[in-house]
Image (tube, helix red, strand yellow):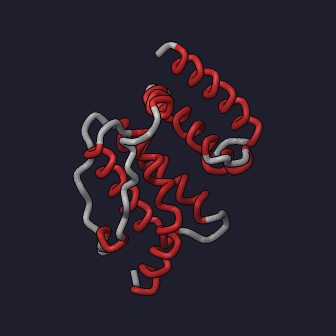
Amino acid sequence: MSTGQEKTFIEFFKPNQKLIHKICRIYTDNTEDHDDLFQEITIQLWKSFPGFKGEARFSTWMYRVALNTAITLFRKPQKQKAQTVDIDVSSLKIEYEAYEDEEHKLQKMYKAIYELSDVEKALIMMYLEDKPYKEIGEILGITEGNARVKMNRAKNNLKTKINTK
């Protein structure tokens, strides 16, 4: 890809990178895995960027790629070998948010979210981001109505898990 494409990618990526940290937080339970998943998602976004046509918002497209990467990577018994790409990921100056100081309730919630299925994790994360059901459906490739039904089930499952901890 050209330098112009790299610059455009970085301009789109930087304001949305917190979303990737949230996905990593939900799908991993330690810093090393978080960092590995963040890097893998960033690589997949970079590799997929030429296919981004702007038909959906960048954040919607980014959610889809990031969630698919997280689900695919952590379903496999062995993680994939690290890939190399022609972008310097460290040049993005990604800042990892400090999660150690979060309140006990938030930690309890994340532990419960971690126990949910992959799809439920994605649904709850998007719910916490105040995503409309229409966009959730677009990201997951399901109808808006199906997104509502799945969201209600995921919220009930999460409540049950939180209350039993």
| Horizontal arrangement in the rendering, residue 29 relative to residue 110 (left or right) | left
User: Which of 45/127 is in front?
Assistant: 127
Residue 85 % position (x, y): 29, 69
Number of residue marks: 0
Residue 45 % position (x, y): 44, 63
- Quadrant of residue 126 within the rendered picture: top right
Can residue 13 be seen?
yes
User: Which of 5/20 is in front?
Assistant: 20
Q: Residue at x 37, y 36 (%)?
A: 75
Which residue is situated farthest in the left direction here?
81
Q: Residue at x 29, y 73 (%)?
A: 88
Which residue is situated farthest in the right direction here?
145
Q: Is residue 127 positioned above or below 159 on the image? A: below
Residue 80 % position (x, y): 26, 48
Can residue 117 be seen?
no
User: Which of 73/99 is in front?
Assistant: 99
Q: Is residue 22 positioned above or below 27 on the image? A: below
Q: Residue at x 64, y 64 (%)?
A: 57
Q: Residue at x 60, y 71 (%)?
A: 53
Q: Quadrant of the N terminus?
A: bottom left
Residue 20 % position (x, y): 46, 54
